[in-house]
Image (cartoon, rainbow, N blue to C red):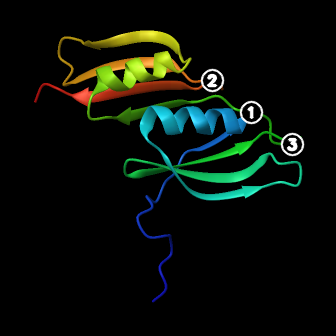
């Protein structure tokens, strides 16, 4: 039986439609050690569809076009070291929302920032079990 989805893909993948997708992709590759799996460009060189592997998940990204305007969203990602990931994001131009902190009753230490496209990222490492 033929597989209904590509090998090693999750069933659900967030899809970001952004202005300046190339800039966002490069930023996310640097922050999260992402790996481009597939890429399709339009004739004007803009990204029509790109699949970026981040850890065990696939994030899909495209440039905005007429009829499909940029959309901002919030994403949460568990990372091995929230402090290193957060510092890397800020050093790469992301806008600080909240420095990593472990709040009472929360098993995670988490921080948050906006990427260059204005998406809200919460990054966490489970620290209290």
25 or 6, which lies in front? Answer: 25
Q: Which numbered disc, 1 or 3, marks the residue closer to the eye? A: 1
Specify whether residue 18 is in view. no
Tell me the SS state at disc 1. Answer: loop
Q: Which numbered disc, 2 or 3, marks the residue closer to the eye? A: 2
Labels 2 & 1 near each other (Cβ < 8 A): yes
**Residue tagged by mark 1?**
20
- Relative vertical location of residue 74 with respect to residue 45 in this rendering, above or below: above
Specify whether residue 121 is in view. yes
Q: Residues within 10 Å of mark 3 (few under 14, many from 20)?
A: few
Labels 1 & 3 near each other (Cβ < 8 A): no
Q: Give the mark, 2 or 1, whose residue is nearer the N terminus.
A: 1
> Quadrant of the rendered structure where residue 24 is?
top right
Q: Residue at the location (70% across, 38% down)?
A: 21
Tell me the SS state at disc 3. Answer: loop
- Disc 2/disc 3 C-alpha distance (Å): 22 Å
- Disc 2/disc 1 C-alpha distance (Å): 9 Å
Q: Give the mark, 2 or 3, whose residue is nearer the N terminus.
A: 3
**Residue tagged by mark 2?**
116
- Relative vertical location of residue 109 with respect to residue 18 in this rendering, above or below: above
Q: Give the mark, 1 or 3, whose residue is nearer the N terminus.
A: 1
Could you tell me how many numbered marks the image carries? Answer: 3
Q: Where's residue 40, x and y in %?
A: 72, 58
Residue furthest left as drawn: 129
Q: Residue at the location (43% across, 58% down)?
A: 10
Q: Where's residue 113, x and y in %?
A: 49, 18
Q: Is residue 57 left or right of residue 52?
A: left
89 or 62, which lies in front? Answer: 89
2 or 35, which lies in front? Answer: 35
């Amino acid at each position: 039986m033929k597989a209904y989805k590509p090998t090693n893909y999750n069933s659900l993948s967030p899809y970001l439609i952004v202005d300046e997708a190339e800039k966002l992709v490069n930023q996310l590759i640097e922050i999260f050690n992402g790996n481009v799996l597939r890429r399709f460009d339009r004739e004007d060189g803009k990204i029509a569809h790109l699949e970026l592997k981040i850890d065990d998940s696939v994030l899909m990204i495209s440039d905005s076009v007429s009829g499909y305007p940029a959309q901002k969203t919030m994403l949460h990602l568990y990372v091995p070291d929230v402090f290193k990931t957060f510092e890397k994001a800020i050093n790469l131009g992301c806008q600080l929302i909240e420095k990593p902190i472990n709040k009472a009753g929360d098993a995670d230490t988490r921080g948050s920032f906006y990427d260059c496209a204005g998406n809200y990222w919460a990054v966490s490492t489970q620290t209290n079990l």
